[in-house]
Amino acid sequence: MILNLVTGNIFLFVTAIGIVGNNIVFVHFIYSYWRSAQKKSVHLILTLLVFANTIILLSKGLPRTIATFGLRNFLDDTGCKMVVYLERLSRDLSICTSSLLTVVQAITISPRGSLPWRFKPKTPWQMLPLLLFFWILSSLKSINLLHYITSSRKNTTEAAKNNHYCSFQIDSQKIKWILLILMAIHNAMFQGAMGGASVYMIFLLHKHHQRVLYLQSSPLHKTLPEMRAAQSVLLLMLCFLFFYWIEYLFSFLSNSLLQNNFVMLNAQEFLTIGYAFVSPFVLIHRDGKLISCKFWRKALRKCLFQ
């Protein structure tokens, strides 16, 4: 009982603070995008990313908090289908947009005239068809799960063991393996693009660092905004890969060696929302404007008096 109470409070804290952090970043990027004379594609992608992360926290963190406090049968079949679908959709969108963010940022800092630089989007509106495609792809990929999602009301014994509020009932092993293979292909494709772009960015940042060391005595040298943005994106991607693969490891252990282990199951659930919780604070830490009272006063004044 005490362990459930402590776990529930942890999930509540992480979910609430994560939603607040993502909303701060979301408002900042929306304001910066519409007010800036030079609109950036990265801001548009980051806006969709923090939106997806907010949905993850609402569809995963909030129900998990309620279930951990003991109210497990609060969703019927329709509610379960909606919550789990939104969770899967937002997680797929998070992977897609994180991958796209890395690739676009790598292209942005590419040397002028290089092959990647030729693919640099001239306006953020060129990103909209691609973002729409990711949304449709994620929607279609997640919709096949609706048939197999049911409320834990139908299996109260299993729900009591692991605090699950919804369950998957896939009778056919063949269908289960098909779904797992499709999910693996999807994740491998986008993480492959993310990894390749990250390695390329590390190479470019290393070259930039060597150039800075060479020009260190010059009073004119400074870190370019594009390079600082690339460092922020790279840190964001490292966080994503950390949470993804640690969650994958915990998922494997909880499904094979440590089945129905309370600590393992809750640690896996926390890792699921870990990236959505941490990512806005990585951006806030890297972008001084997000914690600047002057920026928020100026934004509020313009919203009220224009």
Image (spheres, rainbow, N blue to C red):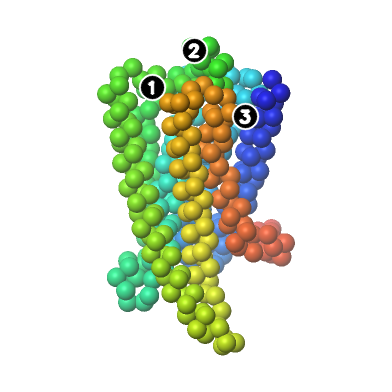
Read off the residue under disc 3.
65
Taking the image as shown, residue 266 lies to the left or right of residue 106, namely right
Taking the image as shown, residue 160 lies to the left or right of residue 186, namely right
Residue 227 is situated, as x and y percent measured from the top left of the image, at 49, 70
Is residue 37 visible to the viewer in this orientation of the structure?
no
Q: Are marks 2 and 3 in contact (CB under 8 Å)?
A: no
Read off the residue under disc 2.
155
Number of the label disc, if any, that sits on residue 148 = 1
Residue 150 is situated, as x and y percent measured from the top left of the image, at 45, 19
Q: Is residue 268 above or below residue 170?
A: below
Residue 268 is situated, as x and y percent measured from the top left of the image, at 52, 34
Whole-number angstrom distance, CA of label 3 to CA of label 1 = 23 Å
Taking the image as shown, residue 294 lies to the left or right of residue 11, namely right
Badge 1 amino acid: Tyr
Badge 2 amino acid: Asn
Please report whichever mark, 2 or 3, sits nearer to the chain's N-terminal start.
Answer: 3
Residue 242 is situated, as x and y percent measured from the top left of the image, at 49, 47
Which residue of the protein is positioned furthest toward the bottom in this rendering?
Answer: 218
| Local secondary structure at mark 1 | helix
Classify mark 2: residues with Cα within 10 Å, few (<14), some (14-19) or many (20+).
Answer: some
| Local secondary structure at mark 3 | helix
Taking the image as shown, residue 116 lies to the left or right of residue 275, namely left
